[in-house]
Image (cartoon, coloured by chain):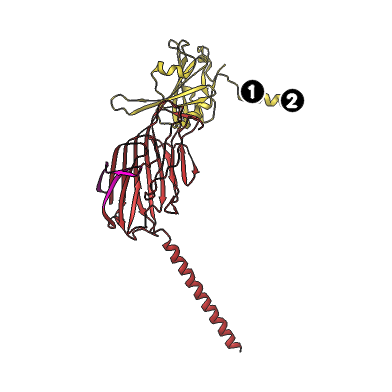
Chain colours: A red, B yellow
Amino acid sequence: MKLTRKLFVSAFLGAATMFIGQLAQAQQPASASGQLTIDSFNGIYHLGRDNRGLSLLTTEETIVADFPSAGFYGLKRELPKTYQGHNVDVKVLAVSDAAGNPVPYKISSDGGNLLITTGNPAIKLFGSQTIKIRYQTTGVINLKGNVDEFLLNVNGRGWDVPISNADAILYIPSDLQKSIKGKPSCYTSLGNTSSNYCQITSSQAAGSLKVSSKARLLQPHQALVLKVNFAADTFTNGHRFKSLFAILVAIVALLALTVTSYRVLKRRNTTL
Amino acid sequence: MLILIITGGIFFIGHSTKSPLPKDINDQVNFKVIYPSSHAAQIQPSSYNYHQQQKVLNFKVNYAGSPIVFSQQPAPRNIGLDTQSYLPALGIHPYAQFDTALGQVALTKFYQSGNLKLFSQSAVLVSQDTLLIATSSKSLTNEQWKSLFDSLKITK
């Protein structure tokens, strides 16, 4: 391992059933004195769907980390680019600091994940630092069961440092609320074990259902997971319109062929 | 040869470290002065102020839509020769640091007592026995600070 004074992340896929493991891991180089700690991981999520029924998720993560004196320059965040075999079209919208000032970042690929690296290697950071990452993803619903399942892995399972506070606020618009099946739930997951050491509440907020969940003192690789079920066929994989379009094209082509054939036959009849 | 001399002359003029201070202040200042040299950072000509007794030179620099106060003075040698040595002496806990041609720069924040609202951001640099503290009441990004300090020069 090259002993560099920066944070780096290794991909760590969550459980197969888990939606979009927002995977980030902060590993310390062996030479580092002091360890980076995550004071809070706060996610705000707006779930929606487009006119094809494809789910859309806009995410704003606020990570407050305490940088040690080892001279790190930023965080690395890994987001899976696929979910259940399809592309989730991760689109990074912005990376900023606590004041909303832009923070430099670069995007690269690491295996099947999109890797966001924040910060400037020439500028070392110390003490409490706030990093906000805004991004959008599509196709985030599990459509393979008898309900449409939204399973949100809030902080991901890749962090190898503890997280003091993990919070998630999910906004579900009114047009989707009537499709919710049962009550939203939460759990924490570590390896193959899960527990219910988390809290979840729901309330109405400006026409949306606001689902708030939190967990405290998460261990390394432990994730807060939020689950909301929707009635089957609330969402689609986005291919419905493509299929309809293909059918429409086929009908038009058939009509055109019929008209052309009719005209040809008619011309033949008139010339005979 | 002539072209080389002319090019060298233009380069020397363009990169000379002639003091930007008004003559009356320049005559009083007996330490090296750090100043911006890019078009993006312009000294307000009317802002020069030198306190003879304290040996503190102040001037304002317009940068990124904000006035930044440059305050500099001779750095006591008994503390150290670089920025790092001065941080504990000044009670400064930096939130970011970067290197420039003139030395290492430490960024720090000052908060209002009581409500702990951000009061100012400051950048501290010790270079060639001059201690510079640049202060902005407006929040600048780390990159903006670095860009400003990368453009600084010091008089001979």
Is B3 placed above or below A192 here? Answer: above
Is B14 placed above or below A225 here? Answer: above
The span from disc 1 to disc 2 (Cα, nearest Å) is 15 Å
The quarter holding residue A225 reads: top left
SS at mark 2?
helix
Is B77 placed above or below A99 here? Answer: above
- Is residue A199 within the magenta segment? yes
**What is the chief secondary structure element of the magenta stretch?**
strand
Image location (x, y in percent) of residue A241: 43, 63
**Closest to the observer: B73 or B98?**
B98
Q: Dot 1 falls on which chain?
A: B
* For residue B4, side relative to residue A223 (left or right): right
Residue B118 shows in the view = yes
Which residue has dot 2 on it? B2
User: What segment is highlighted magenta in the picture?
Assistant: A183-203
Residue B63 shows in the view = no
Identify the mark at residue B65; answer none if there is no mark. Answer: none
* For residue A37, side relative to residue B70 (left or right): left
Q: Residues within 10 Å of mark 2 (few under 14, many from 20)?
A: few
- Is residue B79 within the magenta segment? no
SS at mark 1?
helix
Image location (x, y in percent) of residue B48: 47, 19
At label 2, which amino acid type do we have? Leu
At label 1, which amino acid type do we have? Phe
Image location (x, y in percent) of residue A55: 38, 54
Identify the mark at residue B12; answer none if there is no mark. Answer: 1
